[in-house]
Structures are given as structure tokens and as C-alpha cells.
Image (cartoon, rainbow, N blue to C red):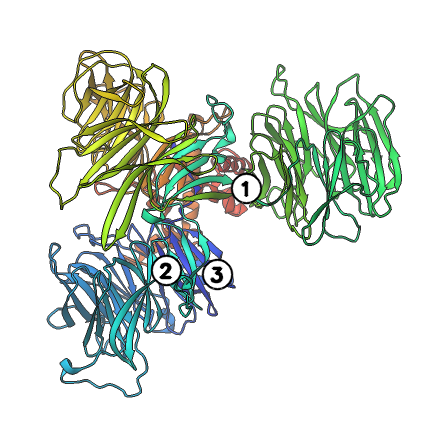
Amino acid sequence: MAYIAPIHRPSSVRHALRSRLLSDTEESLVLAKANRLEVWRLSDGVLSLALSKTINGTISMLQRLRPKDSTTDLLFVGTDRFQYFTLAWDPEKSQLKTLNPLNDAGERYMRESQSQDRALVDPSGRYLVMHLWEGVLTILGLGNRKNNAMEFPCRDQVRLTELFIKASTFLYTETGQPKIAFLYQERADSGNVRLATYRLTKDDRPMDVSKFDPSRDRELDIEVPDPSASMLIPVRKVEEEIKRHNVRHVESAKAHIGGLVVVGETRLLYIDEMTHATVESALTEASIFVAWAEYNVTHYLLADDYGGLHLLTLNTEGVVVKGMDVNLIGRTSRASNLVYLGNDLLFVASHYGDSQLFRLDLANEDPRQYLQLIQTLSNIGPILDFTIMDMGNRGDEGQLANEYSSGQARIVTCSGAHKDGTLRSVRSGVGLEDVGILAELEHCRGLFPLRSHQSSGKTDTLAVSFLTETRVFRFDPAGEVEEVEAFAGMALHQQTLLAMNLMDGRILQVTASAATLLDAESGMTIAAWTPPEEKSIVSASANQEWLLLSVDGTELVSFNIRSELGVVGQRDISKQDQIACIHVPPQPQLSGVAVVGFWTSGTISIVHLNTLEPIHGESLRKSEDDAAIPRDLALIHILPPSGTSSSGPMLFVAMQDGDVVTFNISKDDLSFSGRKRVMLGMRQARFHLLPQPDGTYNIFATTEHPSLIYSAEGRTVYSAVTADEATYVCPFDAEAFPGCIAVATESQLRIALIDRERRTHVKPLAMGEMVRRIAYSPREKVFGLGCIRRELSAGEEIVQSSFKLVDEVLFDRVGRTFPLGGPGYTELVECVVRTELRDSYGNPAERFLVGTSFLPDPDYAPATDTRGRILVFGVDRDRNPYLVLDHKLKGACRCLAVIEQDAGEEGDGMNGDDGGGEGGGGGRLIVAGLTKTVVVCRYDETSSTTAELTRLASYRPSSYPAEITVRGRIIAVADLMKSLALVEYVPGTPAKLVERARHPASVWATALGQVEGDSWLEADAQGNLLVLRRNLEGVTAEDKKRMEVTSEINLGEMVNRIREIEVETTKGAMIVPRAFLGTVEGGIYLFGTVAPHAQDLLLRFQAKLADELDKKTHAILRAEATAGKAQARVGDAADQDDIDDDKTVGHVPFRSYRAFRNAEREGDGPFRFLDGEFLERFLDLDDKAQKDICEGLGPSVEDMRNLVEELRRLH
């Protein structure tokens, strides 16, 4: 049984539009990212996210509609499963509500449209047409009466004679009656392109749809001179001084503004909508245009396939169009959509790179200033490949990652396509952004923020403690810093254990020799306490009222600060135990108590500060032989008062072994409950409290991988921090650095801004070319990249591949680039693998294996029969790649892997044909997936720069191998069309590749990985995930060869790469992380297997949660059955209460969305597969809904909340 959850949600933007959705006075930008809708507000020239909503479906179309007499828009959304609905904004509930849910069951005998599904809206915003099937047009129309203005009373499907439509659009008409234009080919293989226009409805009956009869209803049918034309731009009409009338001699008519521009690769054609007069213009340079946006009625912005942004100008005399010009005005990401937002702001939505917001300055004399980048929305899609650089165990190469490392993983992705290609370091965690470096200081032992004056509301002083001294730095309002020799009478000649401002303008300082109360203004000592002779203060903790000291680790002393440091309690525990740590809660709700951790017994106690007598205690050790010791404490309110679990404070205990133990503390009697344990690292954590505006506290825990502990949505969240070297932290809310913190490392002291919660942090390295494959070498500390550069030179496209290295620390290119290819052919990188192979002396050496394919140039005759190569690279001392092996192949090398054992015997050459070789030992084996063959060969280096490959065995798959993965001697081959086969390498004379098992189904595989024992995870081109298991317990030999599906789900995104991980989990863990997945849409997912003891509970939990969230959908389905209609309106539903409770946007059932689907079959829902993101929606439900779901499950509501919180911590 399997589990999947997103680490980085899809970031690729497929659809974008401008809409008055939220209010009639505010324009919003609406983006579609895979299965999410985002609404962005534009304020002061900057976009900010206003709303993000998940849809149960992959969004394939997005449009806006404007109902009659409405001042706001509706959003029309279509999914890839032919489910459609409209969304309206409910200002009272501040949420989207679903209207007109439609489900097109689809006529299965129809052929799907050859191009992408299209939805078009007429200029009035009331008619919508969809082109889904070849030769069929689906038409929807909003009502024209008040009672049905939000509904679709007009619904129809009509047949088209134009089968192969390349583009379509609505036209602007003087009458307001909708008119549509089609750019089409007469046959699929035809070279000619024609343009036809039709009226959508009959003139006298606007609700009656035209029959689209070409002999009666077609108004225009002309041939387009550019056969590569693929874009139509409607041109609005303008007011004319002299109104035009119908003319008899159309040939002499002039083309006026108001018509259509047909955009080709070499020519432009303008057509007047009324007279059909045409104007033709040639482009100065051929271009492939992919998106457009209207700037004004005579200027249009065009984006080309190479990232160029052009301005199309209609040259006019008055209202007469004389010609057209296209000029390049700048470079952007390769656009999927252009949205002009007004006020010279242009949004470039991109699937291939970052989405960008530009300011247009077309009147600027400097052409380089036409486009000014204002804002970038990061996009790591499409992820072509990725590697896992670190799982939190960099100190020991052989050590498994700890339980918490999945959130700390560093993933480096090959992102973007062509010129937008980048290398991106992706890490999920709390971001730490450096504001400035204060000083190069080593061996810091504490940071304390101070105010020099009581009247000052901001911190202006920072005390830094060292082993033998304390240094003080003063900051002025402008941020200038000065180190001072004296401050408020503090003792600066020794280490400071504690320093803090008090409410009455005094300062408390604790050193190893004394606790001192100082006047901040005069620096005079008000009161002081010193320990007895030959004793010293080991640790101190205080709040505004109380001070608690540990003397020599054997004696506790408490003071009332308001009584001039009067000793209140004193207790010697040297005969019973030793003090490991102490803590006085900072919040006034917990005044009068403290927490003490004990060394010998491994216990903690909450004590009265008046008497130092324990109130409650708890042992932290799991067993009698456990030597765990508490090393730091924090008793705070971390959850805000409105949280569901905020009945009392929480106690956090940092253990010596790196674990953090938490308890819920009763606010009534301070008793312990709800014990939990989280592994933060391999060494003890040090707690640093960060106060929040709402009166709660966050905890910055410094260990080998720092973490932030904070609250989110009523839950406690542990998240990695992107600051590996932090040792001490304190809040530093200075006037020049508002909301900042001070961070000390082993060598520096700096000021930084910290995020309030976990985010995905992406560090890009622009490559200017597509990074197709990546491999990471921990020994050389470099990434090996297979890159493909595509450039346009003098109208000719030039493609050049190369292999290069990038340093992991500098995150920049190092060494020389090794070019691939040559005159007469283009060579493409297909795969890059890092491994250790034996050099000519028999020692292990780091090597990169590169597989390539050739694309013959049609202008040249093939010089040889070589169609691919296997290249082996080494890295020299100057970090330059050098070629060790160049092995030519008769077919493309699609994928490579290595058998991690020495086996094999000699054989003859390897060029992809069947047959075995003879045996012999020595050398690691290389597995190559060629065009039609999988081959195993032995690698032998004969010198430092030469090597040879000897084929040992081969296997022919059904079509050709898309991916191969090796475990031991088992080679898993993911076939392009025929799913998965397991092949075993059998050494001998001759060696053989024997097929042991196969999945007998048609699956277009894209990625493969082993996840557990005999189980394999496979992804296909339709966005499905399958877990396949080898059936070793089968009764017959045939049963044992048939792989069985143990889990399946539709992810909705095509997976390009699966990378296995090894994560050590605690005993009793429900989910074991097994792999990361990278998708075309820019999503990164965590895949895990479910422990047997949790499978039944979690499956039933997901089923009941789906029933609860799909109540509204079920009500609509009941209404459909009652009314006997194929489509039911929301108002027809029998259970209106369920309908009003809109829990699933779009009313698309969860099971329908996640059901497996390909060309052969469609499932009823996810099969033994858990959707982690869906399970987390349980925490967003109200108490009643949570109680209904948990009824009959077994665990209580609180137990299920904790369970879901634990699952959420995984990613």
C-alpha cells in the first residue's frame, strides 16, 4: 500500500487571464497551475497572492464569463476528464462558490481534437464554445433573464465540416451577434490552410444555435497564403466619423479597423470583418508565434517560441488599415499566455520558465528599456531530471538519513526548457535571508538583545558573549554599528550567561561569578548576589519577575527580581541528583513556576519558584538502560488562543541524543499529558525563543540541521531552517532592522530575516540552455550535466549538446565544457549516470557515463551507420571533464545503469543485436538501454584515457526501453508502450538475460523506481502511478511471471523522474518514505509505503473523509437521478444543506479525480493509495465533521488529528 504527498506544489502556469472576480472595482490575475487556481491582486505595481484553491482535476481550460447586468465575472473551469463548472466569488463568506457543474460523459466513438482542448468566449462574455472532439463544437450560453443569468439554458453540440482546426476565435461585430472564425486544414496532411467564419446563433433567435452548414451558414471561406499560420487575433471596432454601408463592389472596398489578423511564420493577413477586404504584409524575419495580448486597438504583443516579445502594429490612416509591422521589443520567458493588465503592465505566464511581470515603456528612446522586469514568479517546471544532493547526513556518507530529514532534503532539479533552462537547488524549510554581516567573530557563546533606554521601543544594542569576555555593539536608527567599551555598568571582562532588560528601566546580567541588577541610565549597581566561595553559576533563566540559577549544577537558587534580587528559595540536591538544565517561562500566564531537568535520573520537574518544591515530574527515559539526558527546556504557549489545542502551554525538552520530547501542560494543575517525540538531529538541540506579535513564541532549535518550531492552522509544526551553521540566535527588532534576528555561527555574526513558516526555497543557476540530465558526485562535489542548447541564427535553428560540470558549493560552472556532435549530424544527450568504476590500476575511480543519440541532418547523406554513443568521463585535478571511453552504437542509448557487483565474462562487440557472449570475471557491469535492446557489458580501462566495453548478454523488450533500474542482478525495464519487465542477469558461459516477470498491460512508461523488496513504482504518460509487485507466491510458473498491481492512483501530472531514498524511521512509524518524484508541471512529491498495522485504518479514514467532502457532489447526483437529467443545476439538488456546504470546489468527487485512467480502462477511485494532501484537509474541517468521520474508525478525534499532523511532518 502506498502514500504520496507534495513537497513542492506544481508551479508551471498553463492558463492565465485577467478578470473582475473579487469585486467590480478590482482587476485580478487568475492563474491555473495543474490542479490549483490562484487569484493574484495587483497593488502598487506588484502582484500578491489573494486566494489559492485546489481543484479535484487537472485544469485544461480557463475562461471568464460576464452574466447579463452583472458587474463581476464568473470563471469557467474545465478539467482533463471533461468535467466543467463555473465559479463565482461570495463576498459574504469570502470564498468561491460553484455554479453549473457539468459532466460530459463523452461520446467514446468520437476522436479527440488533434490540438489542445479549447474554450472560447465571445466579446459579450455570455457565449462559450468548446472544441473537444474532432468535427464537433459544444456551445453553452448564459441566460438573458434575471432568474437564469448565472445558468446555461442554451446548450448544444453541432457538427463541423472543418475537422482539422488549427486556431479559432470570436470576432467583434457591430450587431453584437456572436460570430466565430476557424483556421483549418482540409486534410491532416494537407499543406494549404483556409479561414472560415460563421454566425454562432440565428439573428432572430439568439438562443437557437446555427447549424454550421458550409453551404448556407458560412460567411467567409478564403485560403491563407502562409500554410504555417496558426494564430488568429480579433481586432476591435472603433467609432468612425462616417458610418460605413454595405458596398456592392467588395474588390474596391478598403479594410477598416475591426476584423481579424491571421498570424503566420512568414506573413500576416488582415481581414475586415464587414467587407472581407484584406491587407497582407511579410515578416522581415520568420518566427513561430505562440501567444498574444492586446495592448490597444492598433498594437498587439506577440510572444515567439524562442522567448522573444514582439509588437505588432496596424499601420492606419484614420480607420483604414494600410499595412502591418512586427518589431522585437525584448526577451522574456517562453510564454504560454500573455495577459495585459493595463497601466503598461504585462504578465508573461510560462510553463517553460519563470512567470514574469513587466512594465512596458514603448515610448522610451532606448530600445533596451522597452521591457522592465518588475516581479518574477518562480517556476521549477518542467522538471526534466533531478538528483538528491543531501538527505541530512552529509557528515557520514554511509549513514542513513534520520526520520526528520525528508523536510530537509536538498534536491537539485533540471528545470525549464531551451533558453529558460536552469539548475535549481530546492529545499523545503523556513528561509533565513541575510540582511548584513556584523563581524567576523569566532566561538560565540550567547546573544542578548538590549535597549539602552527604557523609552526606546526598539532594540538598539546587542551583547555577544564569549568564553572570556562580553562584547557590546550599539546600532543607530540608520543601521550604523559601533562597538562600545562599556554599557550600563555591565561586567564585560567575563562570559555573560544572561542579560535582559526589565520593565522598570533596569538591566539584569548574570555571569559565572554574580547576578547583578543594574540601572540602564546611570550604570550603577542596584543589587547583586554572588555564590559562595569556590562555587560558580552554571546556568541562569529569568523572566520579568523571577530569576533561577543553577550553582555548580547541584544547587538551585530562586530570586524575586522586584524585591531587589531577594533570595526566595534555595535547595541543594547534590545528594540526590545533578541539574542538567533550568528554564523560567517568559510568559506572565506561567509566572511563579520553573522547569528543571536532572542529569542522573533523566527526569524533568515543574517546581514552585517560592519553595523550589516539585509540582509534577516526568521521566524521559524509555527503559532502565536508557541514558537519555535533558539538555534544554522551553515551557511556552506556542499555539494562539484560537487554536483547537490551545487549552494549555507546551513543554519542549531537548534531549542529548537529538530528540525533542513534548508534553501538553494543563493550565489548571500543570500536569503532563500528550507525550510526543520528534527526532531533530543526531546531537542535542539548543532552544532560542522568538516572541511573536500575538503573544506566542516560536522556537529556533540549533543542531547540526537547525529547525523552527512554530504553530500553523492550530498545529505545532517542525520545519528545517536554511541556515546550517547557526549556533546561537536571538530576536533583534531594531529600528533599522525590523523583525530581524541575530544569528551567530562558528565564524560570523550576522543579522537576518526569518520566514514565519515553511516555504520552498529555490536557488537558481541560469544555464541559458536546457539541462536535460543530471548526476551528482559526492566525492568530486560536482554535478555532471547533459545540456542541449537551441539557438536561432539567420533563420536557421541550431541544436548543440554538451557535457559540463557545476560545483555543489559555489553552485556555478567549473571546468571546461565538452561539446558533443559534429558537422552533418546533431547529437542529443539522452542520459547521464555517476558511478565508481575501476581504473587501469584496479582502484575505484569516479566516472560519469553519458548516453547519446544522433539526429542526422537531412541536408547531408549519413556518413556512417552510427546512431548513438556511450561516453565515459573522468574529472581531473583542475575539475575539467576528460574523455575515457567513446563507444559508438548502431542505435540510440536511451538509458544507462550499473550492476553493483563484479561478474561477467568476455564476449564480442556490442551493437544492439541479440545474442550472448562468452564468460570471464572482473570489472563492474554496465547496463545500456538501446533503441530496441537492453545490453549488459563489461567495462575495462586499459589506461588513464582509454577503455573498452565487452558485450556479455542482451535482451529485446517489446518496443524500446524508456527507463531501466538495477537492484542486485535484477534489471527492471520500463518499456515505452508495454509497462514493466524484470530481467535477471545470469553470469556464465555464455552469460544471459532471462525474463523473470512482466506486467501484461499497455502502459506508456515515463519513469521507474524500486520502492520496497519486490515492489516497483512506475509512472506513465497519462499521469498515473502504479506499484507493481513480483508475485513470488504464485501457484503456477505463469502466475509467478505475472506482476500484480498492489496500488494505483492518478496523480494528474506526468512524472519525468523517480529517485529512490533511504530514510530511517522510528519504530511504529506509519509511513516509510521511499522515493521523490519530479513532474512536468514542476511538482516534487514524496512517495512512501504504508506500514501493515496502519493500512486498514488509513484506508477507511480516507474513504470516510472523501464521503464527507463529497456530500455536495452526491446531492447533485441524487438530484440528477431524481430529475432524470444528464446534467442538473445546483438548485435542483434534493439536499440543499449539503449543497450550501461547499467543501469541494467544482463538485468533482475525489475518487473520480484520483482514479486510474488510460486509453484501455478507467478505475473507480485510488486503489490502495493514500493522498497525503487530501488527508490533511481533515484538519480544516469543523469539529462536527471531524467527529462524523472518526465515528467507527476506532481512534478518537484528537488521536486522528495527531496522526494527520505526524503525516504532515513528513513533507
Secondary element at image label 2:
strand
Task: Confirm or deny contact between disc 3 and disc 1 (CB under 8 A).
Answer: no
> Which comes before the other along the chain, label 3 or label 1?
3
Residue type, numbered disc 3: Arg
Secondary element at image label 1:
loop
Q: Position of residue 645 (x, y in %)?
A: 61, 41
Above or below, 560 against 39 in this view is above
Kindly report the distance in space between the C-alpha atoms of the residues bearing marks 3 and 2. Answer: 25 Å
Can you see residue 1132? Answer: no
Left or right side of 46 for 617: right
Residue hosting label 1? 430
Secondary element at image label 3:
strand
Depth check: 142 or 745 in front?
Answer: 745
Residue type, numbered disc 1: Val
Depth check: 1111 or 834 in front?
Answer: 834
User: Badge 3: how crowded within 10 Å, few (<14), some, or many (20+)?
Assistant: some
**Residue drawn at 30 percent across, 69 percent down:** 122
- Name the front one of labels 3 and 2: 2
Above or below, 75 against 1080 in this view is below
> Which quarter of the image is occupied by the N terminus?
top left
Instruction: Give me the disc on residue 330.
Output: 2
Left or right side of 1075 for 597: right
Instruction: Give me the disc on residue 41.
Output: 3
Left or right side of 484 for 759: left
**Residue drawn at 24 percent across, 85 percent down:** 244
Which residue is the extreme one toward the front? Answer: 878
Residue type, numbered disc 2: Gly
